[in-house]
Image (spheres, rainbow, N blue to C red):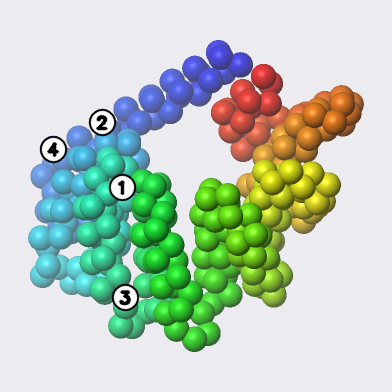
Amino acid sequence: DGISKRMEDETKLEAAQDMNKTAVSAEETVPKSLNDYIEIAGNYEKAFNYSSAAVYYKKALTYTKDAAFKEKEPFIYSKLALCFKKIQDIDTAVKYYEKVYSIYAGNNPDKADEILFETARIYCEVYKFDKAKEIFNRILYSRENLPKKTAAKVYLELSVLEDNNLNIEEASKYVKKALSEAEKLSDIPLLCECYFKYALILDDSGNTNPAIKYYLRCIQTSNDVNVNEYAASAYSNLAEISMDGGNISAAKMYYELAIEADKQLENYEGLYYSYT
């Protein structure tokens, strides 16, 4: 309810304020090393003060003679990318991800693909879907023997892009490819995501019975919310389908299961939606 949501927000605000005080206190001791700057930046980041965090991550980059600098450099650039993403400076975030990519491109293709993936996700968030699609395809065709999990994650993102463009056939094609890769891995969280997103595509296109099948498969694969982050949404969508079909008792059961899953996840937005 509204009171619970306010209490949760106040708790998060107090924690952020405490972390901000910790960062300021550490700052007053005069940082003397690369790790000092990273620690202060990290505390500001935990306090959601991304602008201050970015200042200290940038200062960390000046410690090029520190013995740990080369090891920490990609981490710092990644953190800067995240901070600028959070403050909606997308061009700068992409610039820092490109720096991380240039470090990994020659010697760690898996890490390089992770950075490309995050870059594409940024473009999705700012609705530059063509650019995102270009990068996702770049990952898919960047090399032979692409890890199955990477391929599955990219196929899922492409399915979402096509679904958003109402290209249901293409969206289904991509999510089936993702499922194929996930099934080879027996990766339970990934399988749950695939089943849920396929159900969502079917549901949005009016294919209700197949959608029900895949929502249920998502839940049956794992109803542990720590493994299956889509369980609550699957229950909630099943409740809506049941309600629309006039099956009030089933709708009530699924809403109760959705509420229980959201409570376990402390997902107060989901709780509000299920209660209303």
Looking at numbered disc 1 in the image, what kind of residue is underneath it? Lys
Pointer 3 residue: 104
Looking at numbered disc 3 in the image, what kind of residue is underneath it? Tyr
Contact between labelled residues 2 and 1, with CB atoms less than 8 Å apart: no
User: Which mark is on residue 21?
Assistant: 2
User: Where does the image place residue 220, in percent across and percent down from the top left?
Assistant: 81, 52
At 56% from the left and 14% from the top, the residue drawn is 2
Pointer 1 residue: 85
Nearer the observer, disc 3 or disc 1?
1
Vertical relation: 135 (above or below) 227? below
At 31% from the left and 75% from the top, the residue drawn is 104
User: Where does the image place residue 30, in percent across and percent down from the top left?
Assistant: 10, 44
Measure the C-alpha gap from mark 2 to mark 4: 11 Å
Residue 27 in sight? yes
Pointer 4 residue: 28
User: Where does the image place residue 119, in percent across and percent down from the top left?
Assistant: 36, 59
Looking at numbered disc 4 in the image, what kind of residue is underneath it? Glu
Contact between labelled residues 2 and 3, with CB atoms less than 8 Å apart: no
Measure the C-alpha gap from mark 4 to mark 3: 35 Å
Label 2: which secondary element: helix
Looking at numbered disc 2 in the image, what kind of residue is underneath it? Lys
> Position of 124 compared to 241: left or right?
left
Nearer the observer, disc 3 or disc 2?
3
Specify which label sits upstream in the sequence, 4 or 1.
4
Res 181 quadrant in image = bottom right
Q: Residue furthest top?
A: 3
The crowd level at tag 3 (other Cα within 10 Å; few <14, some 14-19, many 20+) is some
Specify which label sits upstream in the sequence, 3 or 2.
2
The crowd level at tag 2 (other Cα within 10 Å; few <14, some 14-19, many 20+) is some
Residue 182 in sight? no
> Position of 121 compared to 192: left or right?
left
